[in-house]
């Protein structure tokens, strides 16, 4: 409470001094401890989400996932054991994703024996993904990950991202960003040919 003849600034200053006398330096230590524990908890939760000590790396086993196809079927990565896989994560709102789709489609139409191409749409509805695939004449399989579960297993933080998986199910290469040409896509597919 402000005393007569005391300015507001003096009153605030007096209140802060009184508060610091009551709480002392231990309250600051407590705050630091709480913040540190929160940071450790957040780190632990993020690590559990990817199942790794960080992002996936070349040589890691590709995380298994199940996804729905545009026609309502179900696909799992395990179905492609023994084949090479170009696994691309994308969304229709992602400019670089949209740009690379015709290049991927050209490479898919040319084909590489023993190599599958899977394009996983992240976070969008079946209707949105199906409309996009029809409007762009996509020939390759489009899978749906509306909840982002598969994207989470691969530790995605941005789109597009492409994983090249060899016949033994290991990640052979990771490409972050837009695939620049059909030749690049075909070369990536050739790199995981059994």
Image: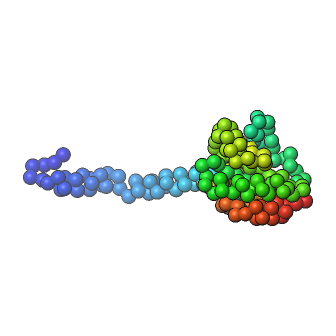
Q: Is residue 49 left or right of residue 185?
A: left
**Colour scheme shown:** rainbow
Residue at image x 46%, y 57%?
A: 32
| Image quarter (top left, top right, bottom left or bottom right) of the C terminus | bottom right
Q: Residue furthest top?
A: 72
- Nearest the viewer among 80 and 62 is 80
Instruction: Give percent across and percent down for residue 124.
Output: 64, 42
Numbered circles on residues, count: 0
Residue at image x 76%, y 64%?
A: 184
Instruction: Give percent across and percent down for residue 3.
Output: 13, 49
Res 168 seen here: no
Instruction: Give percent across and percent down for residue 172.
Output: 80, 62
Residue at image x 80%, y 61%?
A: 186
Res 33 seen here: yes
Determine whether 31 is above or below 75 in the image.
below
Residue at image x 44%, y 57%?
A: 29
- Nearest the viewer among 13 and 65 is 65
- Nearest the viewer among 111 and 120 is 111
Instruction: Give percent across and percent down for residue 65.
Output: 76, 45
Q: Is residue 142 left or right of residue 13?
A: right
Q: Quadrant of residue 55?
A: bottom right
Q: Quadrant of residue 83?
A: bottom right
């Amino acid at each position: 409470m402000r005393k007569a003849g005391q300015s507001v600034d003096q009153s605030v200053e007096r209140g802060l001094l009184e508060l610091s006398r009551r709480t002392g330096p231990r309250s600051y230590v407590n705050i630091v401890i709480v913040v540190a524990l929160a940071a450790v908890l957040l780190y632990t939760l993020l690590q559990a989400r990817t199942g790794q000590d960080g992002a996936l790396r070349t040589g890691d086993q590709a995380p298994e996932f199940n996804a729905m196809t545009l026609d309502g079927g179900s696909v799992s990565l395990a179905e492609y054991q023994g084949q090479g896989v170009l696994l691309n994560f994308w969304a229709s709102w992602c400019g670089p994703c949209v740009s690379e789709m015709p290049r991927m489609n050209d490479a898919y139409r040319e084909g590489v024996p023993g190599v599958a191409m899977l394009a996983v749409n992240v976070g969008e509805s079946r209707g949105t993904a199906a409309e996009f695939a029809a409007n762009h004449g996509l020939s390759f399989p489009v899978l749906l990950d509306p909840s982002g579960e598969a994207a989470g297993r691969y530790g995605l933080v941005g789109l597009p991202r492409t994983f090249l998986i060899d016949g033994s199910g290991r990640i052979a290469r990771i490409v972050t960003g837009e695939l620049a040409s059909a030749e690049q896509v075909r070369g990536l597919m050739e790199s995981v040919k059994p």
